[in-house]
Image (cartoon, rainbow, N blue to C red):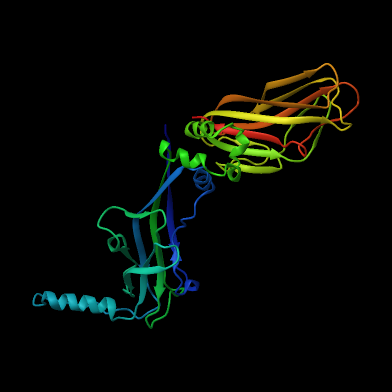
Amino acid sequence: MFETITYKNTTVINRKLKAEDLQNVIELYSTELTNKEIAYRQAGYHVEINRYIKSFKATIDINSTAEVEIPEFNELSTNLEINTALRNLEWKSPRKHLNLMVQTDGLNWNRKGTVSLVNRGDLPYVDADLMAFFTEGLAIEAGEVAKLGVQIQDVGFGWIAPLDDVLIYANVVKEVTIVNTSDNLEQIAGLDLQDFGLSLLEKANAAEIRTLLGLSVPVVIAQRVSDLTLSNGVATEINYTSEILDLFGTWDGTTFTCSEAGIYTINFNCHLMSTAGTVTAGDHSIAIILNSTSYSFQRSIHSTGTASVFISGQITVQLNVGDTIKSRCTANFTGSTATKLAGATTPTTLRIVKDK
């Protein structure tokens, strides 16, 4: 049994080097995990991340150093003379160095190559292809942790000056594959599930947990751990005080906004209690609000008073991108005794699971 989720995004790098950069290494992109990737790894999923850098170039216009003298050649010039003159123009003229840096251990930068930045006079700018320093292919394969950076080195003629214009350009394509296969289900079952809020799914044994993780993805687990007074006959939307899991980053404490279309199961449970210690006879229900439509899916009717009422249930819905989900509790009771959600005693809990 396995489940695979794949996605990719492209980041355009458009970084102009500045005088205040001095000789610092400029990191071109971050390799930090997103909240979504962290949550999947904590849940035991295999998360594979690869980055591909494409169209890595520099546009260069140097004006803060003396203009280089372009060598002249004739039909008698030998290849050796031509190559020597061009090499001297690049590496013996007044110049600055653009170092191309790579980091693979999260700490140390190493130089992979250097581009000479010289003043070419009347030429408006020069485009330098930086890809060739790393690969002969169409993309630099950086994997998950490798970073690319650039650095200006002062070789006796200063750093970048306000008169200079050096623009670094690249496309970074990030591809993410998230896989849950039978190979890692035993590992998942052995985790301390409380650390990830998964124990709140209230599965009786490891086999059921493995089955759940193989088929669906918890996206929101939220709790209200304080009491909330309910007005008689009023449908009250629940504001949650504790966020345990927000896989997609679209939960704001009250509302879940769908960012991936699919089938979702919503679990909701609460504990009703009277402020006087007894819940009087009444008709109490819980519901979800899908966009602006309320769907009641559990109801508790009591003809006589009782110490407390526990209501729980689940509903499965089809969500499209942009749809919103809220939770609601309605208490209808006789007499004047106020009723409350006893979150301080038993947390009011909402779980939203993406089934497929």
In the rendered view, tell whether residue 121 sits above or below residue 327.
below
Residue at the top extreme?
303
Question: Can you see residue 292?
Answer: no
Report which quarter residue 142 is drawn in.
bottom left
Furthest residue to the left? 76
State the image coordinates of residue 354 (x, y, percent, origin top left): 53, 32
Answer yes or no: is residue 193 visible.
yes
Which residue reaches farthest right? Answer: 336
Q: Nearer the viewer, residue 186 or 319?
A: 186
Residue beneath the point at 49% across and 46% down: 41
Vertical placement of residue 285 versus 8, above or below: above
Where residue 194 sits in the image (x, y, percent)?
Answer: 61, 43
Q: Is residue 162 above or below residue 299?
A: below
Q: Nearer the viewer, residue 199 or 6?
A: 199
Residue 239: where, in percent of width, then height?
72, 38
Taking the image as shown, residue 353 lies to the left or right of residue 49, namely right
Q: Residue at x 75, y 20 (%)?
A: 300
Against 220, is 38 above or below?
Answer: below
Q: Is residue 285 left or right of residue 203?
A: right
The picture quadrant where one finds residue 319 is: top right
Q: Nearer the viewer, residue 16 or 318?
A: 318
What x and y, as percent, mark residue 110? 37, 69
Of the 4 image quadrants, the one containing the N terminus is top left
Q: Place residue 106 in its image quadrant.
A: bottom left
- Residue at image x 32%, y 71%? 114
